[in-house]
Image (spheres, helix red, strand yellow):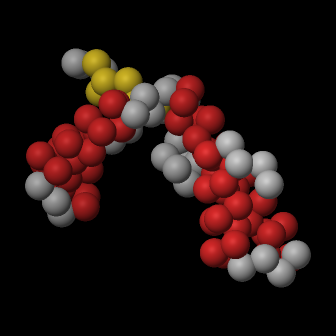
Amino acid sequence: MVAGTLRPGDKLSSARELAARLDVNLHTVLRAYQLLRDEGLVDMRRGRGAVATPAAGALSQLRSEIQELSQKALALGMSPDSLGALVRDSLRGDSG
């Protein structure tokens, strides 16, 4: 989802199918789907399964923008730690 392979409205694999494919416990997949639902990234309906929401598309776009920003920062010689500090400051509302 974060990688951008799912678009809003795309159906996710069933929990049983994904658990079998990844060779993990079904409850692990169900918990992951619940977390995605709680974050607003998927809509889950009985009989319909899990479907990516518009927020999932926005997350994909944000990831692309972050990758672009990271490349620009590296080109300017900024270290990953410096970029991280800049982002943290921005999230806190610090402009200077």
Q: How many marks?
A: 0
Q: From the viewer's perspective, tell me whether residue 42 is left or right of residue 24.
A: right
Image quadrant assignment for residue 13: top left
The residue sitting at 66% across, 54% down in the picture is: 89
- When the figure is inspected, residue 41 is found, relative to residue 86, above or below; the finding is above
Quarter of the picture holding the C terminus: bottom right
Up-down relation of residue 17 to residue 23 (above or below): above
Rendered residue at 84%/67% (across/down): 72
The spot of residue 21 in percent (x, y) is 25, 58
The residue under the point 28% across, 18% down is: 45
x%, y% of residue 46?
22, 18
- Left or right, 27 with respect to 74, comes to left
Q: Residue at x 25, y 61 (%)?
A: 22
Q: Residue lying at the far right in this picture: please name it.
A: 76
Q: Quadrant of residue 86?
A: bottom right
Whole-percent x and y of residue 9?
51, 26
* Quarter of the image where one finds residue 16: top left
Residue nearest the observer in this picture, 51 or 35: 35
Q: Is residue 50 visible?
A: no
For the residue pair 55 and 75, the one nearer the viewer reads as 75
Where residue 61 appears, x then y in whole percent?
68, 43
Taking the image as drawn, is residue 78 in sight?
Answer: yes
Indicate whether 57 appears above or below 85.
above
